Image (tube, rainbow, N blue to C red):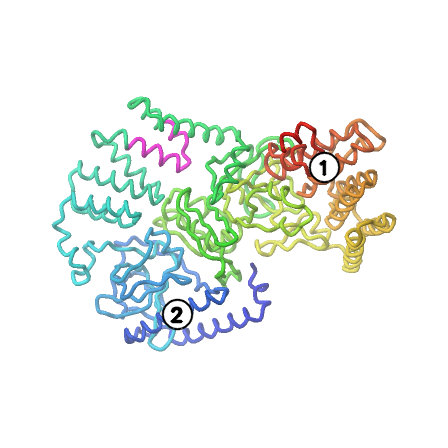
Amino acid sequence: MNLDAWLDEDDNFDLINKHNEILEEAAKHEGTAFEQGSLERLNEWFDDRRKEYDYQRWRVALEVTFAPSMYQPCAAPFEDLNKVMVKDLVCGQRSIDSYILVRTVNMAAKLFAMIVVVEDENENCVMLQVSVDAFHAHDVRYLPKGAVLIVKQPRLEFVGHKKYEINVHHVSDIMFVAPTDDMVPLNWRKRRFQDASEWSLDKWIDMGEAETSKGEHGFSIEWCNQALKRSPTEEDANLIYALRSNGNYAAYRYDAALADLEKALEIPGFTEEVLRRKASVLYKSRSFKECIETFHQLLRKYPGHRNDIKGLAMAYRRLFEQTHGTYDFRAMQIGAATSETLVLDHATYTGPVAVKESEIHGKGLFTTRDVKFGELLLCEKAFAFIFEGLDSRKIPDENAHKFSRARYLDTARVNVETRTVARGPLLDLATQVITKMHKNPSLRSQVTDLYAGNLPGLQPGDDNSVNSFQVLQAILVNGFGSPMTSKTIHAINVDDRRTLHDFSCHGLWTKASYINHSCVGNVHRAFVGDMMIVRAAQDIPAGTECKFWYTVPAKNRATDTRPWGFECRCITCVDARETPWEVRRSRGQLRKEAWRLINGNKTIEYDDLEEKLRSLEGTFSKPALEVPRFALWDLQFEAARKMGKMGHSSQAIYWGLEGFKSCGFIIEGYEPRGTELVIKKWGVVTDEQVEVWVTLFLAMGCVAPELAPSAEKYARQTFMLCVGEEVSFDLFCGSKSGRFWPLTDFELKVNW
């Protein structure tokens, strides 16, 4: 959302004024040294913030936070940083060459961020605020009293009388230190950790296994790291790598798990289990070819294991999807219908398309050869995906864990510098993307290569740091809202138009993000769970850029594409800008009058409606074949649907074909009466056209039966484009639906 639109509400304007006052007060203290306040006052402030947050939750409030001034994450190696104390920090300035070591004084509270009071070795206390993005990616469920942390390149902020905060927004700027680490002062260690240097290897392994069984994978990995620092033998080290691979695998750190498993393969007697785990990690990493090779290696040495054979078959199916684009769409739809999170187990297929420099904007997706209408160009699994249910927002973490947050407390993060406002679902999506990038650096470039507005990208080799501001901006520009499945649009009551745009899912599809916007696109996207299906919406020559619309085009003006940071220059938007205001005002008035005629009564005054639509058509100076008429086709399609329901077949056919002509179609074969309808040129395809073709099929069955099969064929093809597949057509629009096609006696018996 654009900040200007958000500020139209008076309450929001008051919030930003209050935020500016806080910034002005903080600016007065910039450059001043830290001044120690009492711990009692700090704890009171901490409790007040928690109570205020709880009060807002019960009042069904909107939680608004403001992003700080944007800064880059720490890219310097930890070894190059010097330890300083809190008293050495200066307000408003980032300590570039330093880090602080602190421990928590109380148990952290999870509010709009993780907030806790911390102290350094000199007992200087300060409030620490860690963003949800940074905290979630570290596999730490909660932050108890006595936890030890490192903050790299800390920045001290003044927030009130002797009250300071250190804010952490980048996941790589905070480190959770194991209580047995040598950096932890002895007086901070609990009694049971005082003699950690004397622990045996068996005790380290037992502790790691215990934490894994409790689901505390972060602590399990830390115990293994601490054990490796004790200079174990090569054999013992490989055992620790095997144990650590379990924690990395459970925590979705697949890059690290693979590295550990390669070393664990050297353990005698562990080869079978390690190979099986390696195959599983490769499958989760979408490296299906390598996964198949590992399964073959496993089955050669240890044949006959049923789960290995099943896993090999699944890997082959995914590889076939990945290389040939052949999917079982019926199984895909069933999976989306039965999954709680809509995260499906399918591979990404990239067809005859490639990323190149675009004349429209930045980079684009181009065809590498001639493609035909309906051809599959891309079937992509989301890099990250969330499903917002009716009662909670469910965020799947791969295929297992879910993080839910009640919708009674919605969130909004305001960034004054980028002039954007990100709402709750997109913030949740950013958390998932940041977590995935942090845990698997090999995936990082998929996001950092995307356009992120005017924010500078990170340079390769930045110590695997993740810029939270860049990620959120990339999501705001490249993220997609979607229905649970596109076929639900055609399964619902089509009279309720509001549900057509009631998106409940949000995702980031990195390959599809390169498809640029145009109100007159040549490809069409559809969704099945977290899979996006992109097909050609017309015959496309080789080397042509693929385009679809990011938002439903405006009817009587240029489409507003400011949220994406550009101005649409498609033929319809250019024509709208060149059309005089008086013409657009007249067009808008005629549209209102035509809608009243269509929806006002059960019967339609045909002559009056025809006059209005003719007058509306006269406001366009260019032919529809050159500039599609967005302000006209919805009226013509609605007239066709109403005429069909009233039994006026000829009028329904006429207005349906007129609507397709307004969309830029060239359709031949109806006048003079032929034996087959033929689309000579496909125009702009919309979801409404599926029902229009069904209406034409039923009407032609009454007045021109020989043309009805052609209408059914194009209904199927349009459905395939809008839904992504054709196998569901009969169930939702065809003979089995009972909504349009009359059921046969046999189908009536079966359904009964």
Q: Nearer the viewer, residue 543 or 469?
A: 469
Q: Nearer the viewer, residue 8 or 706?
A: 706
Disc 2 versus disc 1: distance between alpha carbons?
Answer: 58 Å
Residue at point 39% right, 52% down? 466
Q: Is 277 in the magenta? A: yes
- Measured as percent of width and height from the top left, residue 585 is found at 77, 59
Q: Which residue lies most toward the right here?
A: 607
Q: Nearer the viewer, residue 28 or 426?
A: 426
Q: Which type of secondary structure does the marked residue at label 2 adopt?
A: helix
| Residue at the spot of label 1 | 694
Relative to residue 653, is residue 188 drawn left or right? Answer: left
Residue at point 39% right, 49% down? 435
* Chain part drawn in magenta: 274-293
Q: Visible in this render: residue 36?
A: no
Q: Which type of secondary structure does the marked residue at label 1 adopt?
A: helix
| Label at residue 49 | 2
- Measured as percent of width and height from the top left, residue 317 is found at 46, 28
Residue at point 32% right, 70% down? 90
Q: Nearer the viewer, residue 400 or 93?
A: 400
